[in-house]
Amino acid sequence: MSSFDTFHISVIEARNVFGLDKSGTSDPYCSIKSSFNKQHFKTKVLKKNLSPKWGQDFTFFTSKPEGEIHIKMLDKSLFKDELLGELTLRLEEFADGNEHDKWIPVTHEPAKKKKSTDSKPAEIRLKLQFTGKDHPQGSHNSNTNNNNTKVDSTTTTTTKPSKEESKDNHDTKTVEKSGPPNIDDKYELRKVIGRGAFSVVKEGIRKATGKKYAIKCISKKLIDKKELALLEREIDIMKKLQHPNIIQLMEVVDTPDTLYLVLEFVSGGELFDAIVNKGSYSETDAAKIVRQIMEAIQYVHSLGIAHRDLKPENLLLSGEEGKADFIKIADFGLSKDFGEEQLSTSCGTPDYVAPEVLMGEPYDKSVDIWSIGVITYVLLCGFPPFYGDSQKELFESIMSCNYDFPDPEWKEVSEEAKNFIRKILVLNPEERYTAEQCLNDPWIKEYAAPAKDLRRLQSFSVQKFKKYNDKYKASNASPVKLDDETDK
C-alpha cells in the first residue's frame, strides 16, 4: 500500500503587525494554501489585535516533501480583505522529520508601514513538522531548546516533549524495533461498534493519552486488488479533508493482514436516530442541521471531491447532551477526487441518489446537492419526497422528479423551506443550486440564525419519522451497486 506523508503546521502567533484601520489596529487572520493539492485553510479572525495568538493546527497531505505552502496574513474587512504580509514554506526544508519552531518574517507588508518609523518586519511564529513512514510524528531535533520562547528566523527549536509525547515516542520506537507495525503497540481495541462487508469498527483507546477513537479494522484477506485500490483512494481522500463537520482520519496502521483506520470518535450516533429520541423538533433545528452538512460539502467540493453517498447513516451526531447538535459526515468510500471531470459509475443508496445517476448519464458534484435536498425534505416532514411500491417505481419517480408538499405534514413548514427544496430537487443538474448558493439562500440564512424562533413543528410526526427510519435501515443497510461499471 502507498505511504502517505503529512506536513503539520501550527500557526501560533504574530508580532509587529501593522494596523490598517483608523484606530491603528487590524482584524488579522491567516490564509494557508498548498501548491501541490487543493487544500486551503484559514485561521480564526482576531478583532483589533496587532499581536494575534491563533494557536491553530492544520494538516497537509502529500506523498513526498516537495512543493510549497503559501501563508498570507490578512486584515478582515467588510468589503475587501487587505494583505498584511505573506511568506512561503518549501517542504523540502523540513524533510528531516524534526519539529521546527520558528519566527518567520513576512514580505509584501502594507506600503504605509514601510513609510512609518517602525522598521521591524512583521513575523509569524509557526511550528512545522513533516511526518510519514520514515518520520513518525513525535520525532524531535536533537538540538532541542527547552525554552520555547523567542526564536529568530534563522533558529530551529522545539518545545520540550510532554509525558504523553514521550510515551508516544517510546511506543513508536517499540514498533520500529519489533519489525512490522502492530496496532496493539499504540491502541487498546475494545468492543465492536459497527460492521461492514469486509471490516469491523471497534472502540479504541490510545495507550499514551487515554483518548477514545473509532478504529476501522479491514481484513486484507477478504478484499481483492480492485477493492484495495478503492480503499487506498478512500484513504487518500480522507487524508485531504480537515473540516469540523467531517469525521477526521487520524492515522493509518498498515499491518501484513489488517489495515487499521484510526478515526475520530463521535458518541451521538446517527442523526436520524437522535431525532427520534429527541421527540421535540423545529424547523430551525432542521435548518441548522442542513447548514452544517452544506458547509462541509462546500468544503469537499472546493477540493474537487464528490462524496456520492450522502444518506442518513453517514450523518453522525457529535456533542454532549443539552448542547446544540453538531453534525459529522462519515464514510467517503464512494467518494472520488474528480476535479472538473464528470463521473459515470452508478452508485449510491436509491432513496437519496440523483436522477442523472439512475439514468446512466455523466454527472458531477451536484449529485451531493440532490442528496442533501432529499435529506432536507425528510428532516422537515418525516418521510422522503420520492416513493413507489417497487424499486422500479421509486426510480421512475426520482427520474421524473415527481414530488410535492402534502398536507398535513407540510402545512406548518415555511414557504422559504419549500423554495429551498425546489432549488435543489431539480431534474437538470445545471439548474440545481450549488453549495455556495444554498448557504446564501434565505431559508438557511434566516432560519439557521441563532436568534430564530425555536417553535416546534406541530405537524412533524416523530412516530412517522421513526417508522420511515426503521424501514429505511431494514431495506438500505448498505450502499446499492446498480451496475458493474467502473469509474472512468
Image (cartoon, rainbow, N blue to C red):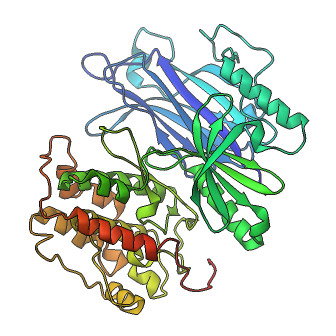
Name the foreground residue: 398 vs 458.
458
Residue 45, percent from left and from top: 37, 30
In the rendered image, the vertical position of residue 351 relative to residue 160, given as above or below = below
Residue 479, percent from left and from top: 52, 73
Residue 244 visible, this angle: yes
Q: Quadrant of residue 57?
A: top right
Residue 30, percent from left and from top: 46, 32
- Residue sitting at 41 percent across and 88 percent down? 391
Residue 374 visible, this angle: no
In the rendered image, the vertical position of residue 241 relative to residue 451, given as above or below = below
Q: Quadrant of residue 69?
A: top right
In the rendered view of the protein, which quadrant contains the C terminus?
bottom right
Name the foreground residue: 254 vs 488.
254
Residue 359, percent from left and from top: 44, 88
Mark count: 0
Residue 414 relative to residue 33: left or right: left
In the rendered image, the vertical position of residue 419 relative to residue 65, given as above or below = below
In the rendered view of the protein, which quadrant contains the N terminus?
bottom right
In the rendered image, the vertical position of residue 63 relative to residue 81, given as above or below = below
Name the foreground residue: 366 vs 379.
379
- Residue sitting at 68 percent across and 31 percent down? 207
- Residue sitting at 49 percent across and 34 percent down? 72
Residue 465 relative to residue 211: left or right: left
